[in-house]
Image (cartoon, coloured by chain):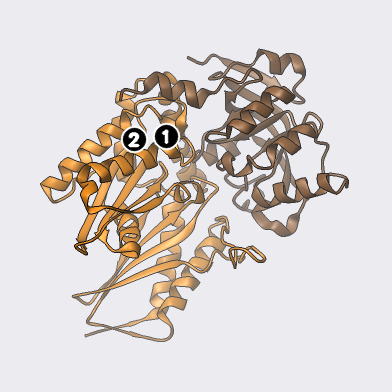
Amino acid sequence: MKTIDVARIIPVIKKLCIDANYYIAPDVVAKVNEFLAQEESPTGREVLQIMQRNYELAARLQMPLCQDTGVAVIFVELGQDVHLTGGDFNEAINEGVRQGYTDGYLRKSLVGDPIVSRRNSGDNTPAMIYTEIVPGETINITVLPKGGGAENMSAIKMLNVADGLSGVLDFVVECVRRAGGRPCPPVVVGVGLGGNFEQSAFLAKKSLLRPLTEKNPDPQWAAVENELLGRINRLGIGPQGLGGTTSALTVSILAKPCHIASLPVAVNIDCHCHRHASAVIE
Amino acid sequence: MSEIKHLNTPLNPADLEKLQIGEKILLSGKIHTARDAAHQRLVELIKTGRSLPFDMRSAIIFYAGPAPARPGQIIGSIGPTSSCRMDKFTPALLAAGLKAMIGKGERSQAVVDALVAYQAVYFTAIGGAAVVAAQAVKSARIIAFEELGPEAIYELIVENFPVFVANDIRGNDIFRDGIARYNRE
């Protein structure tokens, strides 16, 4: 049993919110370099080069890569042998977000209610917190600041079982085609397959956590991802939708068991900045 | 593909006439930010015959809500938001004299048609390159709707702000043409 005061979580979340927004992640840099070398469109190459210049400037000037510093999506793996003390765990996470978005000069992009007032909550809380209890005595945290433009292009569908793999592939490809230049391509395509209605959406989001430079550990799914990436990059959308051969940097699938009558599929799109940062509290 | 062209605001009809989709433009002069909430208010003001917070005639609207500036900084990161959310409001603003918009991503056919009807253009900036864009902003001040926070209307003076012509006054569309050119399905 390990005792951890929730106050220790606050500065960790604060730093992750800032770091994810200021510093482009190495896996994204590697993928953009790889695609820049292959991009056929001169405008596409120019856009990718402007993005690279933006990485350098953001880090040097300590400014967020994108003005849309997003909703703070936070994945927590909480070791079951951790005993949390000192206050409310979720409130500690929100306090970290509050401090990170305020002290880091990040944009506050949440409204307190979706319809009636749509008044800005002022401190970018509440965060979207997903906590999973896992074996162990550490707290693993990933912050995924998620912008609105890419998130808006996401989709979910309860397919017929008979639609099979080809139905899944078509749904994902059509979702990316319809999104076009709006979600800031080249995008990262997260696919949640199976589970039920809400779990498929969660899986799609969670699939974005896999480093872009890593393949799916299951070779069968790795092959499906590869086929999907090929189809998506033949759509011609290109960087910012101006036409080109780089429409997506990767496709990541998470599949789970589902009901005999069901085939849920969800697509969650992330923009080319694909901001993420992780830490472990021991 | 793109040779760089410089343009100064206000854009006159001869400037607009020459613009071709895919051209890279370095824009200098005065522009205004407005996004979802500000658009709703601007169109409401037009509908009720009240005066607007800035002169819409020959105006250029940038669909953007900046990140906060650090002390001493002109502006925080500022890049385009998805333009499609403003499509519903755009024809009314074009009718009031708006001549150009800067955003990212495709517009509806209704907007593309309205650009032809009102002889106006749509530029795309590079989404997610908001520090690069902020370097082109030489002054910034909030002129309306401060209570909307990042959705307030800012008057910006920009110098060599990089954009691409996405929709011209003849109904051409870089997204349609560019994507068709590289489609290999």
Q: Colour of chain B?
A: brown
User: Drawn colour of chain A?
Assistant: orange
Please give the residue where the numbered disc 1 appears in the rendered image: A52
Residue beneath disc 2:
A32
Residue A233, how many percent across, how many down?
31, 31
Amino acid type shown at disc 1: Gln
Amino acid type, callout 2: Val
Callout 2: helix, strand or loop?
helix
Residue depicted at x 72% and y 43%:
B140
Chain under numbered label 2: A
Q: Quadrant of residue B109?
A: top right
Element on which disc 1 rests: helix
Can residue B121 be seen in the rendering of this structure?
no
Vertical arrangement, residue A201 with respect to residue B174, above or below: below
Question: Is A271 displayed left or right of A194 in the figure?
Answer: right
**Image quadrant where one finds the C terminus of chain A:** bottom left
